Image (cartoon, grey):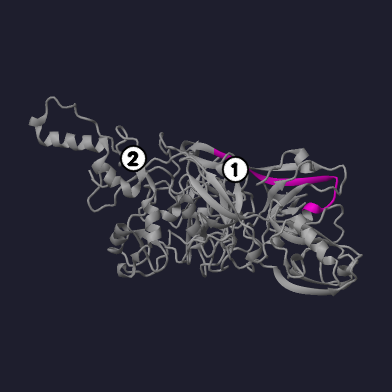
Amino acid sequence: LCCECGQFHLLLDNHLYNFQDEVDDELICHICLQPLLQPMDTPCGHTYCFKCLENFMQEYNFCPMDRKKLSFQQCHKSSLLVRNLLDKLIVFCPFKAECQQTMQRCELEAHLQNRCPGFKKYRSELQRKKNPISKGKEDPPTKVETNTLKDPEVPSGGSSLVAESSAASVVSLGTAEPGLVNPAFEETEEGENVPQRTSLVAETTTIEIHREDPEEELGMRIVGGKDTPLGNIVVQEVLRDSVIAADGRIAPGDHILEVNGVNISSVTHCQAVSFLRHPGPVLHLMVLQEKGFSSKTAQQDSTSATNREVIHVTLIKRDRSEPLGIKLIRKTDEAGIFILDLLEGGLAAKNGKLSRNDRVLSINGQDLRQGTPEAAAQIIQTTESRVNFVVLRQPGVQLSDPVEDGSTSNNSSSSSSSSNGGSPVHHRRRLDQNHYRRKSNYQKGYISHEKTVAIKKEPKESLGITIGGGRDNKNKLPIYVTSVQPIGCLFRDGRIKRGDVLLSINGIDLTHLNYYEAVSALKSNAASHSVILKALEILSLNSTEPSLDIKEQGFSWSPLWITWLGLPSYLHCCQDIVLSKGNLESWGFSIVGGFEESKGNQPFFIKTIVPGTPAFRDRKLKCGDEIVAVNGVPAIGMSNSELIPMLKEQRNKVTLTVVSWPGSLV
């Protein structure tokens, strides 16, 4: 019995632990499929246990993941941050019969040596066996419980915070079953006592909305679009007393997939707004709705192997970024990942060996029988050339009840992670200021331009504008122009336009004022003979986008959500949201965005909030919110694989610093 981990294993093998929570795939060694021990980084960006890599390199001269040429001398110890994240993973004491304590992995050895009653009894029993004379009045031998020959337990409260691809709906994080190394994939019985896993359930629903006035607003705010990291169109808010609120079936967080039979899951934000604002007495919406977590047993996954065949398919990419053109989803009634569609002209469609409804069992030897579309997309996107699929096919079965709009290997994941917990490379420091700097030009299609407008006017002549926003607004918006009236000096001048953000008037800063303070400042300065206005104009670079200013029919005007994203960081007003959770709960939100080599720095956005979770109950966090810091540490420059472990490391409490922009009104 090892005195460091309290489990039976060979002296040269890694220590064994029973982890309380499901461990992020980024922190898993892809040789032993266990959380990393003494992590070592390879030059090609992969991370393995020291002993696993050392043993592997005695027989081979390439990296196990991408098969690039490699020698052990080229590898180096992972960063202190990664090692600290691993040391802080929570484990159970292996002597469950006598000790139910949990602790950080790095504390287990000291616990066993100094505090564990189970280990103390084990050593006493061992001593009695060595010295039989000492037996007598002592307690009878104690049965010592060790779990090393069993699969480590998987708690039902595994974390659901995941890195998503740009077209993916949120799913719970499901890594390969710990301890399984390239198991056979024949669908036989999987055992009677497989522990429960938590899975995230979602449904697609068709909703028919009726309007007495065909031009009446629906009354909801939306975020997202293919021109943003969110990808899908997501409902941010449902307004009170609106058509949507009266219907009662659409809620914040729902993903809108179709409008009147038109697929909007891959259109720009402006195009989606145009579709949803189209007048008509009846509106048909197809939406994807999260239903929360439900527990399944892996036994539900075991089905008859009758008429099924296991098929091996190899697709060869010309380079890492080449898409395969595969759409992956989950189902409500069956565990695992399924092929929803093969995109026309894509690599998989040209190959012709994969089919719709194939169940993906593994990719490049990594077990995905309990996996997620995100995990599959990550493996595909980090593979340089050969992508080896093992799929299960049952002839004649059609796809039904997709849980999500899945993952697609057609694009790089908008929050894809560097594989296998690559060590962070971006320096981070705490900031106490209210504004967190980031580049505002990440977004394709909008630029901001500062302008100064000097006007000579009559003292009694009105400026002729109406304004919105103000720092007392629930979104803490800057002051912006909602209309330029045909009377007044600004209409005659023509340089101030609707949507312009007002920065100052006659040297008086407007950026920190509430609405009424701004109205007062504008009125008092309008009484003078000359007015100097500084404003920020947000310009669209895409002339093909539908114009939303023309013939808006009854829609009250406000800037589109996507235009707010182009504002410079000094106009952001950040707020702190503190979330608390129990030990077995997940935070209950998913994120997209972050640094990628192909796209540079992108903001992190909240994509989904799961019903019944801490983020849902708190009601302050909204879909489309931008995360700028976690516990005071700025998120700028981080990749998804850096931010997610940081969030998971926060055990019971986390402070998210966010910027919240109102969604586009439809």
Residue at x 34% of width, y 35% of height: 100
Q: Which image quadrant for residue 293?
A: top right
- Give the residue number, with chain letter if any, for mark 1: 618
Q: Magenta part mainly helix, strand or loop?
A: strand
Q: Which residue is mark 2?
A: 150
User: Can residue 455 be seen in the rendering of this structure?
Assistant: yes
Q: Residue flagged by tag 1: what amino acid is it?
A: Asp
Q: Is residue 313 left or right of residue 441?
A: left
Please indicate whether residue 454 sits to the left or right of residue 107 in the image: right
Query: 220 or 599: which is nearer to us?
Result: 220
Q: Is residue 130 shown left or right of residue 550?
A: left
Range shown magenta: 276-293
Taking the magenta stretch, the answer to whether it contains residue 273 is no
The picture places residue 76, in percent across and down from the top left corner, at 34, 66
Residue at left 55%, top 59%?
415
Label 2 SS: loop
Q: Give the CA separation, mark 2 to mark 1.
A: 39 Å
On whether residue 282 falls in the magenta region, the answer is yes
Q: In this image, 359 relative to 56: left or right?
A: right
Q: Is residue 197 above or below residue 374?
A: above
* Front in this rendered view, residue 181 or 534: 534
Q: Position of residue 256 (x, y in %)?
A: 70, 49
Residue farthest along the top direction in this orientation:
137
Query: Which sits earlier in the primary sequence, circle 2 or circle 1?
Result: 2
Q: Is residue 390 visible?
A: no
Local SS, label 1: helix
Foreground mark, 2 or 1, reads 1
Circle 1 crowding by C-alpha within 10 Å: few under 14, some 14–19, many from 20: few
Amino acid on which disc 2 is placed: Lys
Q: Is 36 situated above or below 285?
A: below
- 332 or 34: nearer the viewer: 34
Quarter assignment of residue 147:
top left
